[in-house]
Amino acid sequence: MSHQQFSSGLLENAVHEFSKLPGIGRKTALRLALHLLKQPDNEVETFGNALINLRKHIVYCRVCHNISDTEICNICSNPSRDNETVCVVENINDVMSIENTQQFRGLYHVLGGIISPMDGVGPSDLEIDSLLKRVQNNGIKEVILALSTTMEGDTTNFYIFRKLAPFNIKVTTIARGISIGDELEYADEVTLGRSILNRVEFTNSFK
Amino acid sequence: MSHQQFSSGLLENAVHEFSKLPGIGRKTALRLALHLLKQPDNEVETFGNALINLRKHIVYCRVCHNISDTEICNICSNPSRDNETVCVVENINDVMSIENTQQFRGLYHVLGGIISPMDGVGPSDLEIDSLLKRVQNNGIKEVILALSTTMEGDTTNFYIFRKLAPFNIKVTTIARGISIGDELEYADEVTLGRSILNRVEFTNSFK
């Protein structure tokens, strides 16, 4: 399909844009563009604007750095959540995965990545200082480390554990029900939910 | 994933809109939305506007009814194309499929469907009258019927063949290299290209 010319530059544009998305080839992009052509004018406008507005107006929660529409996200501002327990995750996908298990009623802290010297990501590139400030000021009693069970995840776990040592709080990790080497994001809901319930106290010898 | 709540209504919106697309489930929609979040602001705007503009500004060629940016499409207005040969197809996807074989240098005529009594589509719902007018006025010497090899395709072939009988022109069908019952759109390029080259004269007993 690579050399295909369309009789419309507008179609060519739309197909080109669609095919920039991950996992969308040129043939699928064409199918999607032709689908949109058959939809009512205003519905396509709603679609396009939903994407533009998402990118333009999204904010990240000032407390937990989760994706949000407001300065403080609706998890952090929910009075029925347990604000003494904070679950530390790598990214916003992980928040959604854990919320989806409906097993956790505490708050989150999104690091924005994990320590990975190979990729040039050090502790200062992550939201670790803000986590320590939260622990210091906000009456947090337990920090759950819910990072991927990879070497980078373990390194980050250990780094944060050491940083949290001076505070008199419980530090736990999610149970290793998730097979070693797997990304948290792709774990099934049951396994992930159980691993939160069966979380264990973090120690130097937790391996 | 069906009951998943997002911490952002903007994200929820974008995911909802993406998942209306054919073949895009909620999990893929989320992946696409999060991908857009990581792109530069202006690129997402370009993407959204490409889709909106496609739907809003697209026109269909006054001559062949193919998708176009202008009143007459760039195939019909191309002086190097053979304007004595017209290939009749069901829809714009078929034009693209045939163009993609690079075996055909004539013009097209997009019917906008095929005769299908089951779906309530009769000859008057299709661009058949405009085809007859083209044949009458524009010095066309050959009409190639390139419809799907289904019962509806055969019915439409036969109907058009009878309507074209009064004119002194050649009427051909694409070679039946395509297996009976297959949609034209999904044929491979080689088969489709060859079936155009090996087109045969349309007769009452062409079956």
Image (spheres, coloured by chain):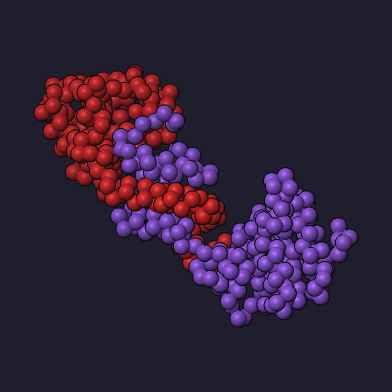
Chain colours: A red, B purple
Image quarter of residue B169: bottom right
Q: Which residue extends farthest right? A: B205
Image quarter of residue A157: top left
Report the residue at 69% width, 46% height from top.
B119
Report the residue at 13% width, 23% height from top.
A139
User: Going by the image, does B205 lie left or right of B5?
Assistant: right
Image quarter of residue A147: top left
**In this rendering, is residue A40 above or below A107?**
below
Residue A43: percent from the left, percent from the top?
44, 48
Report the residue at 34% width, 34% height from top.
B6
Report the residue at 40% width, 48% height from top.
A46
Residue B133: percent from the left, percent from the top?
70, 71
Q: Nearer the viewer, residue A16 or A113?
A: A16
Quadrant of the image for the N terminus of chain B? Answer: top left
Q: Nearer the viewer, residue A164 or B22?
A: B22
User: Going by the image, does B35 lie left or right of B159?
Assistant: left
Residue A122: percent from the left, percent from the top?
22, 44
Q: Nearer the viewer, residue A204 or A196?
A: A196
User: Going by the image, does A169 lie left or right of B94?
Assistant: left
Q: Which residue extends farthest bottom? A: B79
Q: Nearer the viewer, residue A163 or B136?
A: B136
**In this rendering, is residue B171 above or below B8?**
below
Quadrant of the image for the C terminus of chain B? Answer: bottom right
Report how many numbered discs are placed on residues in the image: 0
**In this rendering, is residue B111 above or below A46?**
below
Residue A76: percent from the left, percent from the top?
22, 30
Res. B16 visible in picture: yes
